[in-house]
Amino acid sequence: MSELATERLVSVDSHVHFSDDWVKARLRRELQPVWDEANRKAEEYAARVLRGGQKNLELEDFVDPEASQDPGHFEPAAKLKAMDRDGVYAEVIFPELAGAKIVNPSLMGSDWKEVFQGYNNAMADFAAHDPVRLMTAYQLPLYDIDFAVKEVTRLARDKKARCVQISPFPSDLGLPDIYDARYEPLLKTIEEAGLAVLNHLDLKAELWDVFRRDPTPQKGIFTGLAWAPLAQSICMWILTGTLEKYPRLKVLFVEPGLGWLPWFFRELLDPRMHQHYEFPGVKRPPSETFKAQCGATFMYEPSGLKACYDYFGPDCLYWSTDFPHPATCWPHSRKQVVSQFREAGIPEADRKKITSGNALKTFGLG
């Protein structure tokens, strides 16, 4: 344990549960029923269309029993205490309740923009208990780019935002992919504000067909495949030349799993630059862009960690606790960090980069 005595561990993926009441308290009274009705419609659609009438998987199916019951899952002061117990200095926090999925024009009509700001304000109020240690992954809508640009400016100026979260799959929303010209004002604003873009693991719409066909009791086939569509998101950012167009933009892929990434770049992406494929706007090997402008988070994956470290080096790897999900190392993170990096054979200086230094730099924590 003395190996970590002076290190400020930073988790780049942790979760908190913003309740409906927490969000509604940040909305005008007239908008509170709008929030409830959108939730009702979204659940009705999920039950009837996405799950095809099959039993829902509850939040309890995706969390660690001890961690999920800790007050730090729900309350900001308790969250800091849970981090102290774990020996973690700072965390990027994602909501369990994905507000951007229900706060949209189809479910809320003309009220959606005000509710969206209220949702981000709810996240900001949680982080306000310690805006350095609690870094909110503020959500951005892609339906209205002018509004999204204003929201980036507001969050950076008033809420001291360090990162923003956008959907890794705009096409699931009926929108163009991230390379489209409509996003240029937004990406330029994010880049100029110095904010990191986070593409968190998400359920691609087509994956729900697997849910409906999965015969296993806990839908283990369905839940084991969510990482795969992130390959599409990585390609849309890199092979379209989008990241090279915004050279100061940083995009982190959250919970992608590590082991497949070296193979994906070494065997598929990089070789295509020298084969019969054209990628306008792409001037360097995809792995170079990934190393320069991207990153990937991980929990406990010593073999994948070693593979990525050997192929990409330490500068694009970001450790996380994934509190309070099943893979979490909470409240034993410091012990696990030592054992995992020793198993992966990574030198101490690079371990410090991966568990602390990279995040401190990316999020401007010194």
Image: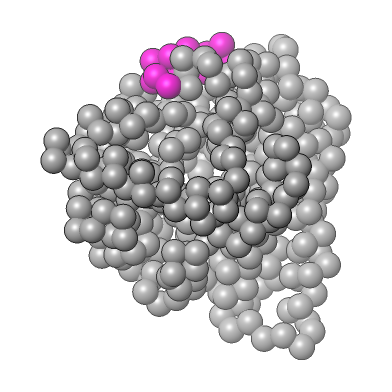
Overall secondary structure of the magenta stretch?
A: helix
Residue 209: which quarter of the image? bottom right
Does residue 82 belong to the magenta stretch? yes
**Percent position of residue 58, x then y:** 56, 33
Asked if residue 207 is positioned above or below residue 216 in the image, the reply reads: below
**Percent position of residue 308, x then y:** 77, 48
Q: For this view, does 330 lie left or right of residue 308?
A: left
Looking at the rendering, the stretch of residues picked out in magenta corresponds to 74-86
**Percent position of residue 348, x then y:** 75, 29
Asked if residue 23 is positioned above or below residue 201 in the image, the reply reads: above
Does residue 45 belong to the magenta stretch? no
The one of 36 and 127 positioned closer to us in this rendering: 36
Q: How many marks?
A: 0
Q: For this view, does 248 lie left or right of residue 225?
A: left
**Percent position of residue 263, x then y:** 82, 59
The furthest residue to the front: 53
